Amino acid sequence: MTARAGLTGRVIFRGDPGYEAARKNWDPHTDRYPKVFVFAQRTQDVANAIKWARKHNVPIRPRSGRHSLEVNLSQVNGGLVIDVSDMNKIKLNRKNGTAIVGTGNRVGRIAHALARQGFIAPFGDSPTVGIGGITLGGGIGPLQRTIGLISDNLLELEMVDANGKVIRANKHRNADLLWASRGGGGGNFGVYTRYKLKVLRAPAQATVYRIIWPWNQFERVLRAWQKWAPSVNTKLGSELTIGPKKGGSVTMEGLYLGPRSEALRLLQPLTSVGTPTSKIIRQVPYPEAVSFLLPPDPVLTQRYSNQFSSGFARRPFPNKAIRSMRQFLENVEGEDAGFFFLNWGGAVSRKSPASTAFYWRKAKFYVEWNSSWIKQSDGPKNIAIVRQTRRNLQPFIVGSYINVPDQGIKNSGPVYYGANYPRLRKVKAKYDPKNVFRNPQSITPARRG
Ligand SMILES: Cc1cc2nc3c(=O)[nH]c(=O)nc-3n(C[C@H](O)[C@H](O)[C@H](O)COP(=O)(O)OP(=O)(O)OC[C@H]3O[C@@H](n4cnc5c(N)ncnc54)[C@H](O)[C@@H]3O)c2cc1C
């Protein structure tokens, strides 16, 4: 019997043509060498791959959009990567306001396809992130105050469990798995192959904006933003990016699901701050709004490696926190480094923290920061400055976002999942009691008893 027997779909072993291309992730320094990649074409290929891995005692990693922010999540040395990216159908049901999507789709592909048909699909700040991974971790973005997290719109799912059994979950059947899949994070319960998402009718037009300030105005802009953004009209999403002192600037962008005249008024508390060097506030047909925020990005593998860290703020950052930010931004050496903020409130915060696995709903804003490097030997100092900044900011944030993980966080379960962690461990014990699906920060099954 050859090693290949039992595997179906597009199968690439180490040494086969296409292996190096299969290893490429968004992070260029992916330093893991899996034994084999299976590019599943259908759910049965996923089931066969799981059974094969169990039989040969090979670790498994599911993969969709290859955008994981740590290099060891969707690849593992000597393991089997089950990649669902070829499973990328999109089927809109206009009457029910639902879309069934293969988990191999990228967020941008779904958002553009649905916008052209008059519907809103949720998205974040990058078109190439996989719907597979982003949904499982929560899925945050500029539309969340209107329609909720991406995972709040997950109505049904299809998943293959550790025995190769196909499981479907919705609010009536396997409701605990649906609950856990709305924010519990990828790589924990099984390999997901299909999602049914709720989608809303899009407005004919929306207003998009992008305002840029010089870097040295970041403190003024941030102070104004953090007072304004969490309580502004919930149809307005706002992302604030602050680059490093060396070469960076301050950019606020997002959209308002309404006319430009109202957007001008709503944005005024920010447009009146400092001296913006560029100001775009444009009313466009909804599909163009999606293109403005998700411009085509053909780059699957970028030049830099990154270390991120993330958290949620329940109060505006006081001066002490802003001083820690300045220290980071002045000293960080990575070209692609800085802070990113996203406003909370609206549909995200209306749901209770226990209503889905995504716990951190009662915040004012989300914050993440990162540094980057090209030469692998520059990694440790960049990782160190990001982690030191986490220690400095710890008094001013709670939790951390599982989709923007930091493997420097010890005992990470309650940090990612708050009070939902014990329940997640029970769901894990039910659907994957032998902990077949695991990674360095995955959920450990609750002990029976
Ligand atoms: C450039 C960039 C921009 C981003 N912007 C945003 C944003 O705006 N909003 C946001 O919320 N997040 C954002 N993220 C974070 C993103 O949500 C996570 O990195 C997410 O995990 C990526 O999913 P993926 O399918 O592309 O990645 P992958 O590398 O394929 O997988 C990531 C994780 O999910 C697991 N997983 C993937 N597919 C499956 C599956 N089918 N079944 C079970 N487990 C699976 C993997 O095992 C791994 O643990 C961004 C990331 C990048 C790199």
Image (cartoon, rainbow, N blue to C red):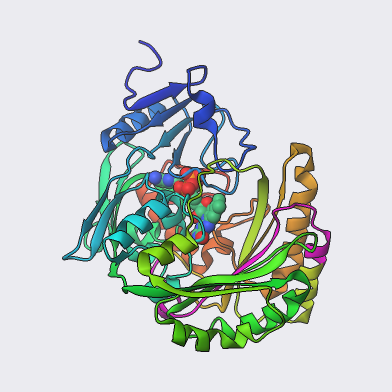
Along the line of sight, which residue is nearer the eye, 55 or 37? Answer: 37
Q: Is residue 351 toward the left or the right of residue 382 in the image? A: left
Q: Is residue 428 visible?
A: no
Along the line of sight, which residue is nearer the eye, 159 or 373? Answer: 373
Q: Which of the image's four quarters has the C terminus?
A: bottom left
Identify which residue is drawn at 36% across, 57% down. 112
Identify which residue is drawn at 41% across, 35% down. 82
Along the line of sight, which residue is nearer the eye, 27 or 362? Answer: 27
Residue 266 point in image, percent of width and height: 51, 87
Does the magenta portion include 123? no
Q: How many numbered marks are there?
A: 0
- Reply above or below: 300 against 271: above
Q: Is residue 340 toward the left or the right of residue 134 in the image? A: right
Does the magenta portion include 348? yes
- Reply above or below: 187 against 426: above
Identify which residue is drawn at 27% across, 65% down. 118
Residue 227 point in image, percent of width and height: 62, 86
Q: Is residue 242 visible?
A: yes
Which stretch did the figure color magenta? Answer: 327-356
- Reply above or below: 419 against 259: above
Identify which residue is drawn at 60% across, 57% down. 412
- Reply above or below: 23 against 2: below
Q: Which of the image's four quarters has the N terminus?
A: top left
Residue 160 point in image, percent of width and height: 32, 42
Residue 200 point in image, percent of width and height: 29, 69
Quick one: which residue is furthest to the left in this view? 95
The image quarter containing residue 304 is top right
